[in-house]
Amino acid sequence: MSDENQSGTPAGPQPEPLRFFGTTWVAQDGGYTARRVAVAVGSLAAAVAACFVLRFAYQGLAIADVGKPVTLLVVVMFAVCSALAFRHTWDAFSKRPDPDRQASLRGLLAIGFIGSLLAYAFRTLTEAPGEKLAREEYEEARRQYERRSRNPSKKRRHP
């Protein structure tokens, strides 16, 4: 049996492409390190730009003179939502998130987008975000494929 199919791709499970990295995370080639650096810098730049946008919103509240309680409530809301979004994003790199919970947190994650950007940037300093989870799943799929595809004539039959 051939290790490649008709299209020239290897037989068996294929690695899951990751955003910004494709499948370069498997062998860490094809500009993997440069991509990690670029993604980390890009995420941090986006987080800084988002902080400036929030600063302008804060100044708008001050100019509108909405009062200290409303201003404090907005600042606390963004801080809490960012912290929760950071934690949720960070956890999603090590285990698959529940789709129903993900849908229910969509608004919170949108408000706390700075936390998600920071989690992405920090994770990129050590690996491609989600690489560890994808690598574990890919290696397990490869092991199962190898076990199933062994020559059946060599298997011992028990009476």
Image (spheres, helix red, strand yellow):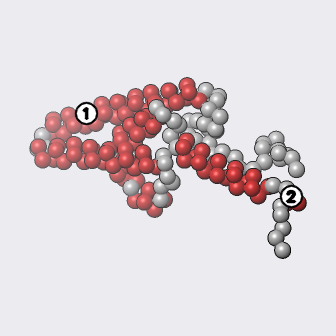
Q: Which residue is mark 1?
A: 55
Q: Is residue 118 above or below residue 159?
A: above
Q: Nearer the viewer, residue 149 or 13?
A: 149
x then y, percent, for residue 42 = 45, 29
Is residue 11 left or right of 125 when viewed as pictured? right
Asked if residue 122 can be seen in this view, the reply is: yes
Q: Nearer the observer, disc 1 or disc 2?
A: 2
Q: Alpha-carbon neighbours of circle 1 within 10 Å: few (<14), some, or many (≥20)? A: few
Q: Secondary structure at mark 1?
A: helix
Residue 74: name its quadrant: top left
x then y, percent, for residue 19 = 55, 40
Cα gap from disc 1 to disc 2, whole angstroms: 69 Å
Asked if residue 111 can be seen in this view, the reply is: no
x then y, percent, for residue 92 = 46, 49
Question: Residue 159 bears which disc, if any?
Answer: none
Q: Which residue is mark 2?
A: 154
Is residue 9 left or right of 137 when viewed as pictured? right
Give me the residue at 22% from left, 37% from top. Answer: 58
Give me the residue at 40% from left, 50% from top. Answer: 88
x then y, percent, for residue 112 = 34, 45
Give me the residue at 82% from left, 45% from top. Answer: 3
The amino acid beneath tag 1 is Arg
The amino acid beneath tag 2 is Lys
